[in-house]
Image: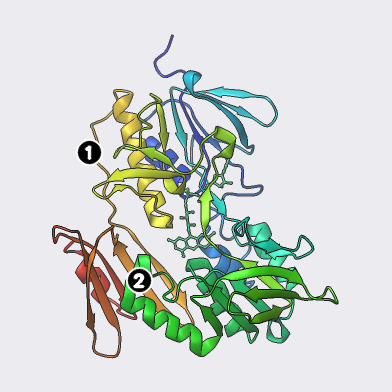
Amino acid sequence: MPAHEHGVVIVGSGAAGHSCARALRSGGFAGRIRLLNGEGGPAINRTLVDTGLLPGLLTQEQIALAPLADVEVIDARAMRLDASERTVVLEDGRALRADALVLACGSLPRPLDEALSVDPAVRQHTLHGARDADGLRRAIPEPAAASVIVIGSGFIGAEVASHYAGAGARVTLIGRSPLPLRAAVGADIAGRLASLHAERVDARLGVRIVAVRAARDGAATVVELEDGSTVTGEALVVAVGSAPALAWAGFDGAIAVDDRFRIPTRPGIYAAGSASAPAMAEGHVRVDHWDAAVSQGAHAARSVLHDLGLGDDPGPWAPTTGFTLVAHGAVIGARGVRGRDAGEATAELEGGGLLTEFSTADGVPSGVVGWNAGPHVARAASRL
Ligand SMILES: Cc1cc2nc3c(=O)[nH]c(=O)nc-3n(C[C@H](O)[C@H](O)[C@H](O)COP(=O)(O)OP(=O)(O)OC[C@H]3O[C@@H](n4cnc5c(N)ncnc54)[C@H](O)[C@@H]3O)c2cc1C
């Protein structure tokens, strides 16, 4: 039997899966690579869904990921995982066996809390893929004349609110935390973001929702808040975070992997990207950012090569990547992670920017976030 005759099967062709396939080839893997694409259209750079597709600046084809040479792309969804056989079963019944199987299936938007009273007649929009952006563009054809409610003041909620506010819509942004994104950007930058939201939109931060219902005429949505107030809008966007897309494989939540992306109890099976929670100094931490998923996919590929006897041990993965968020014209740029029990220190920059540096409980620099901080972020990141 030839070595590695089944090759590598990667479930998910987004940031982590695409990068894993590319790194396998560039790392010298000569066997078969099968990449499952369940996107329903070309695999895309998801970071451009809200900034490129939603405003109509780009098409799905323009944000498609580059084709990969010598990689079989299979446009189908995996429906079942047989871990003992390292096999995934597709929707058409085909079973794909692998010498190494990489689960890189990303995440899906979380729904509103089940405990809330939500009228089933209300149309809830989420923003994840190209179809969602199209759906929103159809629902809000003239943003300048529209009223939009955004529930969730995290990354996507901030960008969606900022997009519609910039287009002239009357936007209400509802968030549970008084300091949006505090866990990712620290208290000072979260405070700046909260103030900017308050200037540009009707920001209801630090409040809980009691109910979501259709207005009497059915044409609008009414959100009732715990302080007794209500807000009304023609369209509702729900952006309350994401959850790993792993129900098909029988996992409840992100897959805890070691620091080389192996699933410890399932030899030959790996998980990378936002469906995984790699072991780090702070414990198992799930990171849902594009550059981290790309870096994790490539690292998982190097672990596969090593475990198949084709490469060196890549060592533990450490997050050095970050994210950029643009809201109402302000740029928040980050590198590294904030970590649990982090120390944080903020400096005010000339010109009004902010730079917050995080350190671990032992005082080791772990991350940096800037508010309109330009090159200061990259300079501080070199110390991580
Ligand atoms: C609207 C939006 C904007 C964002 N903007 C930013 C940003 O500005 N910066 C940033 O850093 N991050 C951003 N993110 C987050 C970033 O896109 C994700 O962290 C990143 O895509 C995660 O990579 P991944 O490979 O884990 O998942 P994905 O890139 O989502 O890829 C997973 C792929 O797996 C497929 N799949 C899932 N299940 C199956 C199955 N059973 N069978 C076959 N295929 C399957 C999916 O269809 C998908 O194509 C944004 C996310 C969204 C939704």
Q: Is residue 330 above or below residue 279?
A: below
In front of the other: 309 or 369: 369
Nearest the eye: 110 or 332: 110
**Would you say 239 lies left or right of 307 here?**
right
Color theme of the render: rainbow
Task: Specify the quadrant of the image occupied by residue 304.
Answer: top left
Task: Look at mark 2 in the image and give the residue it sits on.
Answer: 333
Separation of residues labelled 2 and 1 (CA atoms): 27 Å
Label 1 CA crowd tier, 10 Å (few <14, some 14–19, many 20+): few
Q: Which residue lies at the image location 25% right of the left edge and 69% below the top edge?
A: 378
Q: Amino acid at mark 2?
A: Gly
Type of residue at label 1?
Gly
Q: Is residue 39 left or right of residue 214?
A: left
Find residue 355 and report its horizontal and vertical position in percent. 26, 77
* Label 1 sits on residue: 315
Label 2, ligand 1: CB separation under 8 Å: no
| Residue 237 seen | yes
**Going 55% across and 33% down the picture, which residue do you hit?**
249
Where residue 37 sits, quadrant-wise, is top right
**How many labels sit on residues?**
2
Quadrant in the picture for the C terminus: bottom left
Is 32 situated above or below 260? above
Q: Classify the position of the N terminus by image quarter.
A: top left
Give the image location of residue 256, x and y in percent. Answer: 38, 39
Q: In the structure shown, which secondary structural element does the residue marked by tag 1 occupy? A: loop
State the SS at label 2.
Answer: strand
Work out which residue is located at the far right of the displayed protein and give it: 217
Residue 140 location in percent, x, y?
72, 75
Relative to 359, 233 lies left or right: right
Give the label on residue 18, or none. Answer: none
Question: Which of disc 1 and disc 2 is earlier in sequence?
Answer: 1
